[in-house]
Image (spheres, helix red, strand yellow):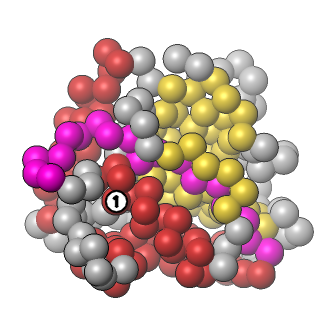
């Protein structure tokens, strides 16, 4: 963990989310998955989720939000938003910063891969829900570790060395397999995204 990140740090695994009004840091490791960092700057409430769409195909004429895979992403986003609202956030104040969606697992066929679909989904969802997207670091070929900081809602991003990406790909394949079977878990360089 970088020295500039204060304690306590809550680490999220794939399929998890957390909303908080406390002074804690939310962190996760991303490959093809996406993390949405939401915050209400007026009420000082923040939250993060970590999701991976369960499908790798999307009909070009069907909005991703309406696809079977998109329904999982909508569920992940609504769980986080609802938890934030329960502790006092107001929907009209919500802002977003999103990260992840790398091409860690190469597509088996022509068309978009998992990471690309995750990126497309989160942009569509935020646009549809009218939640302003304040910053993003999506796509590419490198995984990321992110730290969502409570003081100013900035996000510290650390790129993952290529040598550790096969482990991320293995974990994501396991998660995709579990999602396709209908199972879910229960609930380099640093950059600062301000």
Residue 64 percent location from the top left of the image: 35, 75
Q: Is residue 182 left or right of residue 156?
A: left
Residue 155 in view of the camera = yes
Q: Which residue is mark 1?
A: 117
Residue 178 found in image quarter:
bottom left
> Which residue range is magenta in the image?
93-110
Residue 56 percent location from the top left of the image: 21, 60
The C terminus, quarter of image:
top right
For mark 1, does the 10 Å Cα neighbourhood hold few (<14), some (14 to 19), or many (20 or more) residues? many
Tag 1, which secondary structure? helix
Q: Is residue 77 above or below residue 153?
A: below
Residue at image location 36% in from the left, 80% down from the top = 63
Q: Is residue 10 left or right of residue 76?
A: right
Q: Is residue 100 above or below residue 143?
A: below
Residue 27 in view of the camera = no
The N terminus, quarter of image:
top right
Q: Residue furthest right?
A: 42
Q: Is residue 68 above or below residue 138?
A: below
Residue 166 percent location from the top left of the image: 24, 26
Residue 144 percent location from the top left of the image: 48, 33
State yes or no: residue 108 in magenta. Answer: yes
Residue at image location 44% in from the left, 43% down from the top = 139
Residue 18 found in image quarter:
bottom right
Residue 84 found in image quarter:
bottom right
Predominant SS along the magenta part: loop
Q: Between residue 141 and residue 188, name the one nearer to us.
A: 141
State yes or no: residue 13 in magenta. Answer: no
């Amino acid at each position: 963990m970088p020295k500039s990140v204060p304690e306590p740090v809550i680490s999220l695994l794939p399929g998890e989310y957390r909303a908080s009004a406390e002074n804690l840091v939310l962190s996760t490791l991303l490959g093809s998955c996406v993390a949405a960092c939401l915050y209400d700057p007026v009420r000082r409430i923040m939250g993060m989720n970590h999701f991976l769409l369960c499908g790798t195909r999307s009909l070009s004429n069907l909005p991703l939000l309406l696809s079977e895979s998109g329904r999982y992403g909508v569920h992940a986003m609504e769980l986080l938003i609802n938890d934030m609202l329960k502790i006092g956030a107001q929907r009209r104040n919500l802002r977003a910063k999103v990260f992840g969606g790398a091409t860690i697992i190469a597509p088996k066929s022509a068309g978009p891969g998992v990471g690309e679909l995750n990126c497309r989904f989160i942009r569509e969802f935020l646009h549809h829900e009218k939640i302003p997207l304040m910053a993003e670091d999506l796509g590419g070929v490198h995984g990321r570790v992110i730290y969502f900081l409570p003081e100013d809602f900035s996000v510290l991003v650390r790129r993952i060395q290529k040598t550790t990406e096969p482990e991320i790909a293995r974990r994501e394949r396991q998660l995709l397999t579990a999602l396709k079977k209908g199972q879910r878990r229960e609930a380099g360089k640093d950059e600062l995204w301000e």
